[in-house]
Image (cartoon, rainbow, N blue to C red):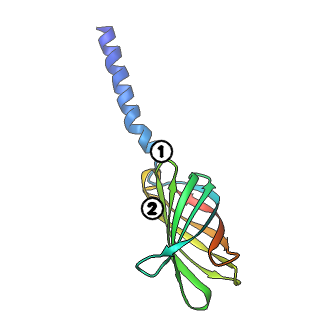
């Protein structure tokens, strides 16, 4: 009888752990701000059917590790830029953001990423992250970003 009870309790403990672990990986309801900081480099790869300029890049950051990203940029009057981007971590989790900003010179832009969610551990992600981008030729670009993310 003791062995059966112990096995039952061990099984129950493992089942509880299996259900609790995914909850610890994802944000709790209240979430917590965590520093997101990274660098990426890439190039223009085309124009989307919506008219957005597509930039594909690779990089590395906290919480994502090595990533790829696809960015859709719309150009507005007086150097304004906006759009959205998708970061894809090596494990396949995605982090989504909308952004807006401004060219501050012919080769430099600054702005803010507004984190809008994602997949996997980023499904409920939020945050506001600043970025600075440079382009020496209008084709190649490098970007750095930093700010709090909540997931």
Q: Position of residue 136 (x, y in %)?
A: 70, 75
Quadrant of the image occupied by residue 68: bottom right
Name the residue carrying label 1: 25
Q: Secondary structure at mark 2?
A: strand
- What residue is at 57 percent from the left and 91 percent from the top? 77
CA–CA distance in space, label 1 to label 2: 15 Å
- What residue is at 62 percent from the left and 82 percent from the top? 102
**Residue 102 vs residue 150, the one in the foreground:** 102
Q: Is residue 30 above or below residue 133?
A: above
Quadrant of the image occupied by residue 105: bottom right
Residue sitting farthest toward the bottom: 77
Q: Is residue 30 above or below residue 127?
A: above
Q: Quadrant of the N terminus?
A: top left
For residue 22, side relative to residue 108 (left or right): left
Q: Secondary structure at mark 1?
A: helix
Name the residue carrying label 2: 117
**Residue 118 vs residue 24, the one in the foreground:** 118
């Amino acid at each position: 009888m003791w062995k059966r009870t112990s096995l039952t309790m061990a099984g129950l403990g493992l089942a509880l752990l299996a259900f609790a672990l995914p909850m610890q990986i994802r944000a709790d309801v209240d979430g917590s701000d965590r520093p997101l900081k990274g660098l990426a480099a890439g190039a223009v790869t085309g124009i989307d059917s919506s008219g957005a300029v597509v930039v594909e890049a690779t990089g590395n950051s906290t919480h994502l590790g090595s990533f790829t990203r696809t960015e859709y940029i719309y150009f507005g009057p007086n150097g304004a830029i906006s759009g959205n981007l998708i970061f894809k971590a090596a494990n396949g989790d995605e982090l989504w953001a909308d952004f807006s900003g401004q060219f501050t010179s012919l080769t430099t832009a600054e702005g803010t990423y507004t984190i809008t969610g994602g997949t996997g551990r980023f499904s409920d992600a939020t945050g506001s992250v600043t970025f600075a981008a440079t382009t020496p030729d209008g084709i190649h670009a490098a970007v750095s970003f930093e700010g709090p993310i909540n997931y």
